[in-house]
Image (cartoon, coloured by chain):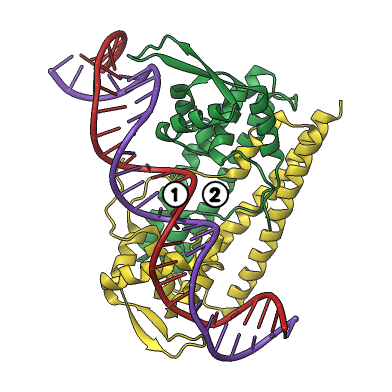
Chain colours: A green, B yellow, C purple, D red
Amino acid sequence: MMEQASNLSHLGGAVLGLLARKERTGYELARAMERPVGYFWTAGHTQIYPELARLEAAGLVRHRDVAGRGPRQSKRYACTSAGLRALREWVGADLDPQPVRDLETLRLWSVWTVAPGVADQLVRRSRDTHARVLEAYLVELGEIFATGHHRASTHPDFASRLTLEGGIRQRRAAVEWCDWMLGELARAGGH
Amino acid sequence: MMEQASNLSHLGGAVLGLLARKERTGYELARAMERPVGYFWTAGHTQIYPELARLEAAGLVRHRDVAGRGPRQSKRYACTSAGLRALREWVGADLDPQPVRDLETLRLWSVWTVAPGVADQLVRRSRDTHARVLEAYLVELGEIFATGHHRASTHPDFASRLTLEGGIRQRRAAVEWCDWMLGELARAGGH
DNA sequence: TCTTCCATGTAACGCGTTACATGATTTT
DNA sequence: AAAATCATGTAACGCGTTACATGGAAGA
């Protein structure tokens, strides 16, 4: 019933997880939060900059000033040893099952109120999205295999491979589900 | 890039979707938001009561006072014809792909920082959760089959069956993924 | 010339969660 | 006797998104 204490927020875990892999500026973090972290978590730059300040105040990251390509100076952040310890604790902490928030399925739950053609369109669009994401995941997995570090369980590429494999299986299941639904809709609408 | 206009919020869609199936009080709506709607969307009673007021102000629901079992009088809400139209529009609206927010996978992405034993425990707990939810879904699916209305595409049970089937496939894929990860961890840790 | 990319931040707003508030009936 | 269920609401708080703000360099 109670979640194990861990002073890191979800966002803090995401940012530290990126910095533990390599040093980055706030801007680079924001881009990484689009892809590949965006495959399972998202955050805009307006969240990241304040979070970096909080993490630095807590001694979990530190920064050096570097010359930026933009008009301002850039700050390149790195994870401290205290930061790595906090990250480890956060990863290992007990976590009670997270509630699902799936807007697509929520809409689908009321699909009995609309005409069969509308339902069909809905599922078709959903199938296309899942299929496109699946393709992107497969490309990304190929890139990880190419680097050759994906077998050692303490290498970042190993963890990337685990998460990608999960995404691939998830999307594959979703595509198959959509195909199954299209069949059910055709059968129900067919007579 | 732009989402089709629909004056209903997500929460409004969830509430109207419930009321389109049958009349309910605020309390009953809150319980239904735990199960079965909680399988893909959640909302507490503190969200639902204000939302009902908003929907009523917009003419999408109306209420009758009924005798409550609690100390207060109860209000039993029903979806109006304008509400049903709004729900149909909301279901059929274009919706751009939703970002994923999966805390479990986010943590897994940093699993390379912890000891192999910790990683193993993490995946095992995750597997257990998915397996338990899968069992619950299968029971629920059996109940829907028992009612016998699940083949008509304009019956609520039809839509419930589609969403449940999706949940079952999703969880099944998740359990298999966890088993696969346990194998990978054993192989990586074994030498 | 216009748009996009680089690069950093602040401010306002909305949704969702937690805590607070009340109190009768039913179950343990 | 204590706890959970029934039943409705308000208030405070935190996280995430959108809008605002600045401005140089590179590409279309």
Q: Please name the residue that numbered disc 1 is placed on.
A: A126
> Measured from the top left, where is residue A103 in percent x and y?
45, 54
Whether marks 1 and 2 lie on the same chain? yes
**Residue at figure coordinates x 54%, y 28% from the top left:** A57
Q: How far apart are marks 1 and 2 (CA)?
A: 9 Å
Q: Few, some or many C-alpha atoms within 10 Å of disc 1 (few <14, some 14-19, many ≥20)? A: some
Q: Mark 2 points at which residue?
A: A174
Q: Which residue type does callout 1 highlight?
A: Ser
Answer whether residue A113 is visible to the viewer in this image: no
**Splitting the image into 4 quarters, where does residue A87 fall?**
top right
**Residue A15 point in image, percent of width and height:** 55, 31
Q: Which residue is drawn at 71% across and 59% down?
A: B132
**Between D6 and B138, which is closer to the camera in this rendering?**
D6
Verify CB contact (< 8 Å) between mark 1 and mark 2: yes
Q: Nearer the viewer, residue D17 or A73?
A: A73
Residue farthest right in this picture: B191
Residue C9 percent location from the top left of the image: 38, 28
Splitting the image into 4 quarters, where does residue A27 fall? Answer: top left
Disc ID at residue B188: none
Compared with A133, A126 (above or below) is below
Q: Is residue B89 visible?
A: yes
Tell me what residue is drawn at x 29 percent, y 69 percent.
B85
**Residue at mark 1: chain:** A
Quarter of the C terminus of chain A within the rendering:
bottom left
Disc 1 is placed on an element classified as helix
